[in-house]
Image (spheres, rainbow, N blue to C red):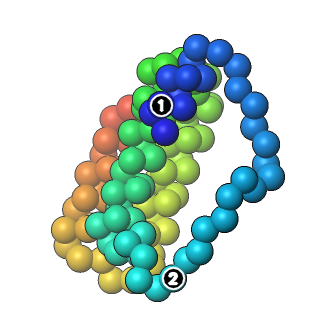
């Protein structure tokens, strides 16, 4: 994702909503593990901050909206079941990092 941000920072891009590839989902996927899921949510925060550094999400409302989406994903993850204390601590730490950069 960081590569695409750097490319887009240098020129225009085109978005096509049509699927260009397929993938399959199965119960044994790593994305279904807590560490992978929380890692993906944390990575989204890092992508938001990298995008802002490169000049994207320049308007405060855009940045807030992106950060709110990350918080929403973290809340949904916590609501999925009984998170371990370590998982809860990691997501709480993420919420603190978001609060530190969020400008109202």
Compared to 72, does 64 lie above or below? above
Horizontal side, residue 72 vs residue 74: left or right: right
Residue 97 sits in quarter:
top left
Mark 2 is surrounded, within 10 Å at the Cα level, by few (under 14), some (14 to 19) or many (20 or more) other residues, namely few
What label does residue 35 carry, if any?
none
Q: Nearer the viewer, residue 77 or 8?
A: 8
Query: Residue 43, percent across and down?
Result: 39, 47
Query: Residue 83, percent across and down?
Result: 30, 77
Secondary structure state at the residue bearing disc 1: helix
What label does residue 26 carry, if any?
2
Residue drawn at (23%, 76%) of the image = 84
Contact (CB < 8 A) between labels 2 and 1?
A: no
Residue drawn at (42%, 43%) of the image = 45
Query: Residue 12, percent across and down?
Result: 70, 19
For disc 1, the marked residue is 3
Residue drawn at (43%, 61%) of the image = 74
Compared to 98, does 55 lie above or below? above
Residue drawn at (54%, 31%) of the image = 4
Tell me the distance, in whole angstroms, between the alpha carbons under discs 2 and 1: 28 Å
Horizontal side, residue 6 vs residue 28: left or right: right
Compared to 101, does 19 lie above or below? below
Comes first in the chain, label 2 or label 1: 1
Horizontal side, residue 12 vs residue 54: left or right: right
């Amino acid at each position: 994702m960081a590569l695409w941000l750097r490319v887009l920072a240098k020129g225009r891009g085109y978005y096509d909503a049509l699927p260009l590839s397929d993938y399959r989902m199965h119960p044994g996927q790593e994305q279904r593990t807590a560490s992978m899921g929380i890692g993906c949510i944390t990575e989204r925060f890092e992508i938001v901050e990298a995008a802002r550094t490169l000049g994207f999400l320049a308007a405060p409302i855009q940045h807030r909206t992106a950060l709110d989406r990350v918080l929403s994903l973290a809340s949904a993850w916590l609501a999925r079941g009984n998170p371990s204390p370590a998982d809860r601590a990691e997501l709480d730490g993420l919420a603190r990092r978001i609060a530190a950069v969020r400008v109202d």
